[in-house]
Amino acid sequence: TRVCWPGAESRIYRGRLYLFRPMAPNSGPDYQGRLDRDVPWEGPEGRLELRPTDSLGLPDSWAQQGLTVRFRVGGERFKPLHEAHSRKLKKWLQLAGIVPWMRARIPLLYRDSSLVAVGDLWLSDEIRQVEATGPVWQVSWSDHPPID
């Protein structure tokens, strides 16, 4: 349920009421941007940057090469780190309780045609197959409306 009035809107999801300012139009399913370890990405969906981490993260070679920032078009499949199976991204977002109006606004990071990160929510299990040399990088996603 969505109710709008000048300067605000409200929605209900899973029994919770959300009240916020109307969101700016998003980048859309055809958008493609770039993110690498030296240059953050910014758009109506927030800001993405790569930060060094001591835990599991994206390999340095991927961060140097750069990643493509895209948004959902539907039908994407993804296998998060430490999960047994690949599923449709839509299902992972539902299981995580991500509010429906934010699902198309979560930046998806691709290495070539492979989905390797979903915002700062999940890394692909694919990172376990890469021998890490040099630093590893975590995705930081900021300046966005609440997602749950």
Image (cartoon, rainbow, N blue to C red):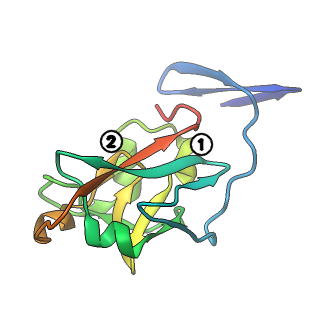
Q: Residue at x 69, y 25 (%)?
A: 20
Q: Residue at x 75, y 44 (%)?
A: 24
Q: Residues within 10 Å of mark 1 (few under 14, many from 20)?
A: few
Disc on res. 39 = none
Q: Is residue 115 visible?
A: no
Badge 2 element: helix
Q: Where does label 1 land, which residue? A: 101
Image x and y of residue 98, in percent: 44, 39
Q: Quadrant of residue 19?
A: top right
**Closest to the observer, 48 or 116:** 48
Badge 1 element: helix
Q: Residue furthest bottom?
A: 112
Image x and y of residue 68, in percent: 48, 70
Q: Where does label 2 land, which residue? A: 95
Image x and y of residue 32, in percent: 58, 71
Q: Residue furthest right?
A: 6
Up the image or down, 5 lies above or below 23; here it is above
**Closest to the observer, 124 or 57:** 57
* Left or right relative to 82: residue 116: right
* Left or right relative to 87: residue 25: right
Image x and y of residue 61, in percent: 28, 72
* Left or right relative to 140: residue 137: left
**Closest to the observer, 7 or 50:** 50
* Left or right relative to 107: residue 85: left
Tell me which label, 1 or 2, sits earlier in the chain. Answer: 2
**Closest to the observer, 74 or 35:** 35
Up the image or down, 69 lies above or below 1; here it is below
